[in-house]
Image (spheres, rainbow, N blue to C red):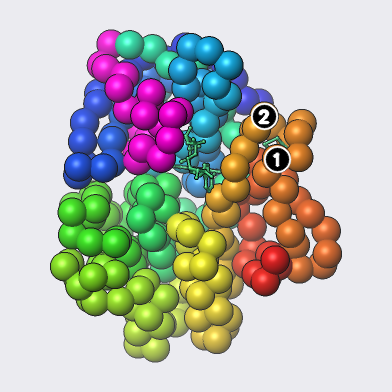
Amino acid sequence: MPMQRMCQIVERGQLNPYAVTMTLAVGEELSRQISFGQFVHIRCGEGLLLRRPISICDWQEGLLRIVFEVRGEGTAWLAERKEGESLDVLGPLGRGFRLDRQGRYLLVGGGIGVPPLLSCAVGTAGRSTAVLGFRSADRAMLLGDFAARCAAVRVASDDGTIGVHGFVDGVAREVLEADRDFDAVLACGPKPMLKSVARVAKEFGVPCQVSMEERMGCGVGACLVCSCDMADGSRKHVCKDGPVFDAKEVDWDA
Ligand SMILES: Cc1cc2nc3c(=O)[nH]c(=O)nc-3n(C[C@H](O)[C@H](O)[C@H](O)COP(=O)(O)OP(=O)(O)OC[C@H]3O[C@@H](n4cnc5c(N)ncnc54)[C@H](O)[C@@H]3O)c2cc1C
Ligand code: FES
């Protein structure tokens, strides 16, 4: 059951010039309910500004970590908050990754889609492999955190300034060519990236779950802002039915 509460920022930092990390004291009751790939809806701003969805990067007893980049007014307001201040948090929300802690996963993240996969790496302690993609070296983040929790980490960048010059789907293909013994590919990032990763996973016969991003209003299934087209012609709510879907469910050409 999602909870709404005021949560103190106990730690705030910068992972690179663009990405902010915050640890929030959410209380044990809330943190106990979290599962991999869920998100929180945070009130951003004092006025009529709506809440903004931010994925849960990691959590432990009573604490929850988020990582975000500034996109517009809401995230700019959030980035200005300081340690000791409190945020109005609603969560945990959504259906996340279906993950077996004993499993072995190929985690594929692009840009700000990288942070939500960290909890999956933590949850599968040393068994999963991560493929992380960034626009350029100055946007890379959490590489040490993934390295400490994964069997292997591969990095790619659009401009070649860090890791392999290219996209994550190409690197995911290389990993699967060498070893396709993964329980699933878990992917988070922009839709074109997810589409390419889903295609590669299908080619190698590995199940694939994708975390979709849509603009959100209420965050709890009460409006239609976040609807997403499904392969069977239906529309689902990213906030309530997702954000994580089986890649086979999604209409990739919508
Ligand atoms: C389930 C979910 C989890 C998310 N997790 C994270 C996270 O962990 N870290 C993070 O940095 N961001 C995350 N986002 C994206 C984040 O919610 C948006 O960047 C934020 O809502 C933008 O609000 P704003 O007021 O700053 O910008 P706005 O002024 O509302 O928008 C600025 C620009 O971003 C576009 N935009 C806004 N929201 C979205 C969206 N959801 N999808 C695509 N384009 C959008 C707008 O069209 C506009 O061009 C997540 C989104 C979803 C749906
Ligand atoms: S954001 Fe309102 S239904 Fe999903």
Secondary structure beneath dot 1 equals: loop
Look at 29% across and 34% down and name the residue there. 21
* Nearest to viewer (mark 1 / mark 2): 1
Q: Residues within 10 Å of mark 2 (few under 14, many from 20)?
A: some
Of the 4 image quadrants, the one containing the N terminus is: top right
Residue drawn at point x = 46 percent, y = 17 percent = 45
Q: Residues within 10 Å of mark 1 (few under 14, many from 20)?
A: some
Q: Is residue 77 magenta?
A: yes
Residue in front for this viewpoint, 86 or 31: 86
Rendered image quadrant of residue 226: top right
* Residue for badge 1: 225
Quadrant containing the C terminus in the rendered view: bottom right
On residue 51, the disc is none
Specify the amino acid type for callout 1.
Val
User: Closest to the observer: 114 or 204?
Assistant: 114
Q: Is residue 108 above or below residue 83?
A: below
Q: Is residue 151 visible?
A: no
From the top left corner, tell me how far across and down residue 88 is, in percent. Answer: 49, 16
Q: Which residue is identified by label 2?
A: 218
Q: Tell me residue 127's x, y (percent).
A: 34, 63
Q: Is mark 1 in CB contact (under 8 Å) with mark 2?
A: yes
The Cα–Cα distance between marks 1 and 2, rounded to whole angstroms, is: 8 Å
Q: Which residues are magenta?
A: 64-84
Mark 2 CB within 8 Å of ligand 2: yes
